[in-house]
């Protein structure tokens, strides 16, 4: 294996410029991309999926880990030739899919065996992609290593009672455990975005411990946190209406004080509420 030319040379050779409409901010710092890749840990038996590889700053250390197989999904076709050329330098079988990661069927790509997803996510699609992976049934990933806008990462790991606590923390807690493992200042990116970033590592809960009706969790949390200053008796009205019942009935069934506010209820309380909502709605 020889090493590919320096990333900046490749970017110049292929004339790759960041395009804001694709949310492009490149990581060119080898130290940082190496650290992010190492968070995948053992990849010897996995299909490693990278979403939005761009010019390949993170792709290189991911390929160096030597996964069983690697698949990169990139929407902007300008990067494909440079990525193909990069793949030639590594022994790992490497496929590139040109397309929208929101529309890709990961289970079909992976086939049998475990998968890990690593990505410096495009900010505009980061949250919907993450929710898509949380909702995947069966859970096809063993670990997610994801760079997010710092505020979004904080919402994902937020404990009950904190100002970032809400729908995203509760959806995550239903099926997984997430932690922030490193923060990256805006200047780590080219061009620098307006916000700071953070990398989270997410691992699925053991199968028997997951609450999998995430559609019901979304219904009750959207309603409850849509008016987070109000009591649940009031704020749950929209979700209760959709299930032809009242907030009081749902809250009583879930053992929650109707006078409480959403941010004081731990994830388990919302799972009980989601169960009551599903029972009422059918
Ligand atoms: N991973 C590269 C890096 O760290 O330097 C690029 C990161 S850049 C923030 C996001 C990348 O995701 C871009 O290459 C962009 O074209 C790609 N992208 C944006 N939306 C996408 C989507 N829906 N599906 C796949 N790739 C997407």
Image (cartoon, rainbow, N blue to C red):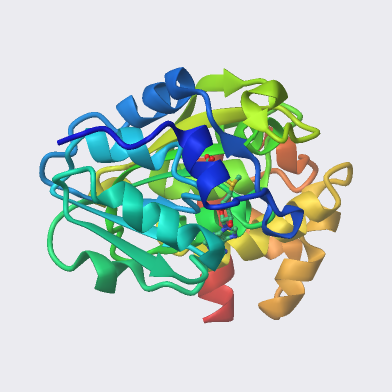
The mark total stands at 0
Which residue occupies 50% across, 36% down?
Answer: 9
Q: Is residue 48 visible?
A: no
In this picture, is 55 found above or below 108? Answer: above
| Camera-side residue of 233 and 59 | 59
The location of residue 167, given as percent across then percent down, is 65, 49
The location of residue 261, given as percent across then percent down, is 78, 40
Which residue occupies 58% across, 56% down?
Answer: 273
The location of residue 84, given as percent across then percent down, is 34, 57
Which residue occupies 45% across, 48% down?
Answer: 174
Q: Quadrant of the N terminus?
A: top left
| Quadrant housing residue 95 | bottom left
Q: Is residue 9 visible?
A: yes
Which residue occupies 17% across, 55% down?
Answer: 93
Q: Is residue 199 left or right of residue 67?
A: right
Q: Is residue 205 left or right of residue 53?
A: left
| Camera-side residue of 70 and 225 | 70
In this view, the residue farthest toward the front is 13
Q: Is residue 106 left or right of residue 233?
A: left
The location of residue 208, given as percent across then percent down, is 25, 50
In this picture, is 117 found above or below 98? Answer: above
| Camera-side residue of 236 and 7 | 7
């Amino acid at each position: 294996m020889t090493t590919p030319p320096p990333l900046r040379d490749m970017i110049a050779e292929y004339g790759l410029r960041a395009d804001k409409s694709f949310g492009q901010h490149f990581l060119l710092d080898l130290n940082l991309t190496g650290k992010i890749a190492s968070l995948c840990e053992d990849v010897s038996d996995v299909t490693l999926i990278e979403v939005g590889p761009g010019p390949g700053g993170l792709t290189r250390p991911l390929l160096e880990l030597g996964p069983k197989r690697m698949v990169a999904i990139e929407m902007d076709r300008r990067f494909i030739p440079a990525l193909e050329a990069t793949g030639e330098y590594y022994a790992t079988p490497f496929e590139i899919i040109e397309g929208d990661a929101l529309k890709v069927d990961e289970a079909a790509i992976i086939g049998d065996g475990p998968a890990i997803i690593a990505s410096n996510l495009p900010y505009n699609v980061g949250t919907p992609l993450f929710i898509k992976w949380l909702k995947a049934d069966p859970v096809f990933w063993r670990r997610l290593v994801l760079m997010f806008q710092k505020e979004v990462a904080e919402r994902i790991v937020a404990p009950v009672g904190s100002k970032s606590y809400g729908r995203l923390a509760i959806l995550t807690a239903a099926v997984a455990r997430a932690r922030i493992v490193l923060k990256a200042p805006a200047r780590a990116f080219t061009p620098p975005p307006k916000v700071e970033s953070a990398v989270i590592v997410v691992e699925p809960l053991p199968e028997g411990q997951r609450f999998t009706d995430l559609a019901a969790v979304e219904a009750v949390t959207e309603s409850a946190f849509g008016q987070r200053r109000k009591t649940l008796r009031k704020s749950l009205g929209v979700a209760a209406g959709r299930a032809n019942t009242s907030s009081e009935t749902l809250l009583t069934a879930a053992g929650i004080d109707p006078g409480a506010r959403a941010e004081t209820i731990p994830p388990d309380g919302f799972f009980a509420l989601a169960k009551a909502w599903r029972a009422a709605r059918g």
